[in-house]
Amino acid sequence: RLARTWFSQIGSIYYKEDVPKSLRHTPLYTPNSPITPSENCDRFCIGPIVDKEFWRAGRAALNIDRGPCKCNEPLYV
């Protein structure tokens, strides 16, 4: 089911209380997602990418945007 979900942004899934307030208001799913909004929208949001490729080999010290990134097409996990 998660693999068929259309998310509104590219990033990692977080509990809302674990990200800055500025990231908490974007909808979790796209408007045309096959999953209807549920309690998950109140608990989770998309935040910065945590993939190790964005952090290893000295990249953790870089001041770069790690997301979340908006997208124009439906995204599948």
Image: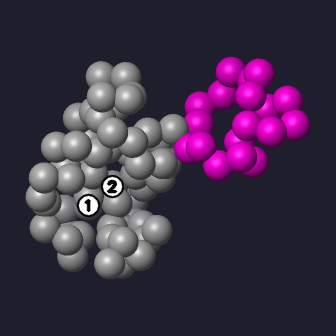
Q: Nearer the viewer, residue 13 or 71?
A: 13
Q: Is residue 75 above or below residue 41?
A: below
Count of all numbered marks drawn on residues in the image:
2
* Residue 70 x/y as whole percent: 42, 48
Q: Is residue 7 above or below residue 63?
A: below
* Residue 53 x/y as whole percent: 75, 48
Residue at image position (73%, 37%) is: 55
User: Farthest residue in the right direction?
Assistant: 57
Instruction: Give the labeled residue for mark 2.
Output: 8
SS category of the residue bearing label 2 = strand
User: Which region shows up in magenta?
Assistant: 49-66
Q: Quadrant of the N terminus?
A: bottom left
The answer to which of marks 1 and 2 sits earlier in the sequence is 2
Secondary structure that dominates the magenta span: loop
Task: Please tell me in which quadrant of the rendered image residue 45 appears.
Answer: top left
Amino acid type, label 1: Thr
SS category of the residue bearing label 1 = loop
Amino acid type, label 2: Ser
Instruction: Give the labeled residue for mark 1.
Output: 30
- 24 left or right, relative to 55: left
CA distance for labels 1 and 2: 5 Å
- Circles 1 and 2 in contact, beta carbons < 8 Å: yes
Query: Is residue 9 visible to us here?
Result: yes
* Residue 74 x/y as whole percent: 37, 68
- 44 left or right, relative to 70: left
Q: Nearer the viewer, residue 2 or 28?
A: 2
* Residue 12 x/y as whole percent: 48, 48
